[in-house]
Image: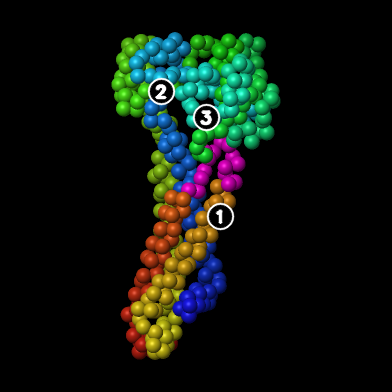
Amino acid sequence: MKDLFLVFKNLTRKPLRLFLTMFATFVAFLIYGTLTTFEDAIDAGVELSADDRLVVVNKINFTQPLPISYVNRVEALSNITGVTHLNWFGGYYQDPQQQVITFAADPESFLTVYNELLLSDEERTAWLQNRQGLIVGEALADQYGWKVGDRIPLNSNIFSQADGSSAWEFDVVGVFTGTDEQANTAATYFHYDYFNETQTFGRDYIGFMGVRTSDPQLNEQVIKSIDDMFANTPFETETVPEKTFNKAFIEQIGNLSLILGAVVFAAFFIILVIVGNSMVLAVRERTGEIGVLKTLGFRSERIFVMVLAESLLLAIASGALGLFVTSLVVNILNSIPQLPVMVLSTDIILQAFGIMVLLGLITGIIPAVNALRLNIITALSRQ
């Protein structure tokens, strides 16, 4: 207890230096926690992808359409348990700046292939029966205050109706959640038939297909069967596992892991220099006091542990505060539906505490060794 008291008094003897050092470390762990949580949320789109689900797109580019007739032909293949089709709508609500992820889908097959999206039995039935029905993700419903029974317009920045309008009217019939807390609920889905009958161009074409296989080990066989079927046709296909498709889509933004990793590394490198220099300076200022402690009978090993404990306490206290503020930042960011759902997981917290301990050891080891080796005569002569 006496040693802890001495550690605490040594740590707090210069409040301004303590504050600046802790603030720098706090910022580093705030950056680490926020960016790592964001990266984890981005990767969740890949990790949550079903192993037995494939995505079929136009071989030229995923923005090019496919004939809707392809759906029945794919469905007839063996080792397939479900096929659905979707079309990107390019939707927005009230203002072009308020983009809404919107797809025209086949309701029944969509709910079978993408069964991680959860609706109540009443909502499912209502969507299947109402051709103008719209199911809305929980995140979007919270953002705009939508609820079951509302009738809302969604505009498209791509398609238009025969009367020249770009707005489609929908009845909100369900609010879906996900089987996982990081599932994407910032999207909406409506009937493809309603969309197909009212649009002025692109009729009887789809954007892509979602295909469920009977066994993930049969994916390669199914992929070959689909792509071979449409080889040398005007609309050749490229079929890939959903994980691969989502990963490739994310990588269009850039190598996020490299970018975020570089930012975190730079933050910790700077903190390592700042805190390390601060600890060396703090121990050097106490050279005479260390000599007095050794004169009073404090063993060198005991002083070594005290200096190291000082560095560890500084790193852990600052880092823990950084993680606490990170949790608040994550809650704020989760109120923005356009961002993926972020979760400050136990793994991230444990990794952060591991870094705190490592940072404390690295920044404290040199001054601790110097204190260990310091003899009494040298220490007192410097006083």
**Residue labelled with disc 1:** 325
Q: Earlier in the sequence, mark 1 or mark 2?
A: 2
Point out residue 68 in the picture as x, y percentages from the top left corner: 46, 12
Point out residue 126 in the picture as x, y percentages from the top left corner: 62, 20
Disc 3 and disc 1: Cα gap in Å?
31 Å
Q: Earlier in the sequence, mark 3 or mark 1?
A: 3
**Residue labelled with disc 2:** 212
Residue at the image position 55 percent from the left and 47 percent from the top: 330
Residue at the image position 62 percent from the left and 13 percent from the top: 161
Q: Count how many numbered circles sit on residues in the image.
A: 3
Disc 1 and disc 2: Cα gap in Å?
42 Å
Magenta stretch contains residue 338: yes
Residue at the image position 35 percent from the left and 81 percent from the top: 300
Disc 1, SS: helix
Label 1 crowd bin: few (<14), some (14–19), many (20+), radius 10 Å: some
**Residue labelled with disc 3:** 117
Q: Amino acid at mark 3?
A: Leu
Extreme-right residue of the structure = 150
Please give left or right for residue 104 compared with residue 305 in the image: right
Whether residues under marks 3 and 1 lie with C-beta atoms below 8 angstroms apart, the answer is no
Label 2 crowd bin: few (<14), some (14–19), many (20+), radius 10 Å: many
Disc 2, SS: strand
Magenta stretch contains residue 220: no
Stretch of the chain drawn in magenta: 331-345
Q: Earlier in the sequence, mark 2 or mark 3?
A: 3
| Front label number (3 vs 1) | 3
Q: Amino acid at mark 1?
A: Val
292 relative to 301, above or below:
below
